[in-house]
Amino acid sequence: MPYLNRYAFIGNLTQAPELRLPPTSLRQALCLLNVAINRNSRDESGEKIVHTTYINDIEVWGPPGEACAHFLTLGSLVFIEGRMDMDQWQDKKSGAKRSRLKVVAENVQFLRIRRPGDEPQNTGSSAPVPDEAEPARKAARRPRGSPKAKA
């Protein structure tokens, strides 16, 4: 029987990305992300309720991790695809076995990058902000097959 370990979600960064560069050039850079995922519902009286789940351990390795650290900021909206993984270690002080679940990102898409000074936007919508210049570009295009205008 085949196994499936896929995890995909859209959420907002709750902290600035943390980039960890290894001491040698033989290893890849590691970027750590913390993301909040909102889910909206309504109670019996019709009032909106926001349920928030926090994913605190997301690892992005290599050049994609460096791009995340360079472009993303607190509040940026991202789409992340990856796999669940577990770290296990022995605590140095107590000797107890410890473990944590994490997401190892295989694909990170920047949906909305929040810049310093931007006003907070409603995070209820997960759709990317449309490019304001897009309608002007579409209008300026000549349909295929139409004759060229003579000057």
Image: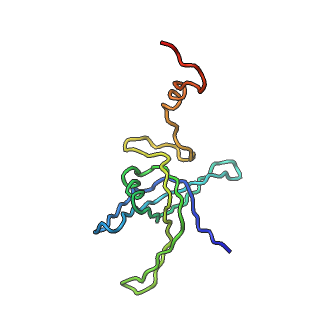
The vertical placement of 55 against 93, above or below, is above
For the point 51% across and 71% down, the residue is 85
Residue 134 horizontal/vertical position (percent)? 51, 32
- Residue 4 occupies quadrant: bottom right
Q: Is residue 10 left or right of residue 3?
A: left
For the point 52% across and 37% down, the residue is 130
Q: Nearer the viewer, residue 142 or 148?
A: 148
Q: Nearer the viewer, residue 107 or 87?
A: 107
Residue 15 horizontal/vertical position (percent)? 41, 56
The vertical placement of 61 against 91, above or below, is above
Q: Nearer the viewer, residue 22 or 48?
A: 22
The vertical placement of 99 against 108, above or below, is below
How is this picture coloured?
rainbow
For the point 30% across and 66% down, the residue is 25
The residue furthest right is: 44
For the point 46% across and 65% down, the residue is 57
